Amino acid sequence: GGFAFEDEGDKGKYHILEHYLVGSILENSDYKLQLDGEADMEGVEFYLTTTKKGLRDDLKFLIDGLTKPNFKNKKILLKESEAVQSELEEYLNSKEGETFWAARGLLLGKDCPYVRTHREEVKIAKKISLEELGKFYREKFKRGKWTLVVSAYAPEKNIEHIVEECLGNSFCDEGKKLVYPECEVKTLNEIRKPITNVSGAYVYFTFPGMSFENSVLERLAINIICSTWLSSNKGQLFKQLRQSGIYGIDYNTFFFKRMGMVIFSAHVPLAKVDQLTSLVRNGLNDLIANGVGTEALDDRKKSDAESWLAEWDSNEERHNWIVQDIVQDGTVYPPEKLTKILGKINQDSIQKVIKKIINPNKLSVIVLSGVSA
């Protein structure tokens, strides 16, 4: 499930459903459970923190709450509806957030399932009934693919039996192949769309990126390419940007099950848009021709390996890492495994990924300002 799998008229229902389920489970447990949830682009996640002693009771409470919910509590629906509206309005009140989703909408088309419509979600949260929410749960949520991850420090030998006991007959082993919506990046020449009350200009340089079907090596490589190209103060682009009074470009790499995007972005005065665009285009041409440089590549690989070990040492971050890997790749890539893959990344593999992704013919430049887009 998730936002990318909602039909027209259902935008935001996974979000309000996640809130309602968490709110119901917490109230039924008299708020003794440490439970939280999150609805994102391709899934809905629930996080339960418990003790070895409380595992059996707490997990059973969670499973029952997710598989046998009661859609009759108007008080919880009203409370969670207000919480969702407040959360969404925070995005809507953020000009950076508004321009980000406007840019994605211009690039992919407003009907692309990977474009969120926060205003539509607010409408759903305001008007949805318990009956409608229950129907959505039965038709969409309950029939989805569920993954349970239990992580514990020095777990008891019988922990697997406890989990199996809690699951009981709530789930079956029958697998169902999921079909994900395809999204193709559209070719854009010029589109004008008013964006009100925005100072300066948000400039986005976007390329079609990678999905989870691409290898881990390629996904690691594109992040190395983007970060070293932008952050190296030894690079020509860094120097030229600083001399022009532009103090930074950010990047994001989005990996989904059937699509991906690479986005470089900056906020500049409207008068500097052409200058920024020219500098970035020249910088991209230099990146394509010369790669990232051996010293920069070695430094980034060393930095990545060290940061992975630090993340793995944190219980919370290690747990999130494991869950994400299992959901996305069906296996876990601990630091030692990632470091081995990282060791295979060299100038040749970097250049292959650059040619594959940083393709000038697939570059879209989007400028959003208070005047036009």
Image (cartoon, grey):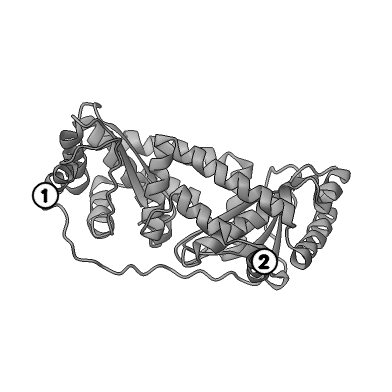
Q: Residue 123: percent from the left, percent from the top?
A: 42, 47
The N terminus sits in image quarter: bottom left
Secondary structure beneath dot 1 equals loop
Work out whether 78 lies above or below 341: above
Q: Which residue is mark 1?
A: 168
Q: Residue at x 47, y 48 (%)?
A: 335
Secondary structure beneath dot 2 equals helix
Q: Which residue is mark 2?
A: 354
Pointer 1 local density, CA inside 10 Å: few below 14, some 14–19, many at least 20? few
Work out whether 206 lies above or below 74: below
**In the image shown, does 299 or 45 lie closer to the viewer?**
299
**In the image shown, does 223 or 31 lie closer to the viewer?**
223
Work out whether 281 lies above or below 227: below
Q: Residue at x 45, y 41 (%)?
A: 312
Q: Residue at x 84, y 44 (%)?
A: 242
Q: Is residue 371 left or right of residue 68?
A: right
Q: Earlier in the sequence, mark 1 or mark 2?
A: 1
Q: Residue at x 40, y 67 (%)?
A: 180
Q: Residue 373: percent from the left, percent from the top?
A: 71, 57
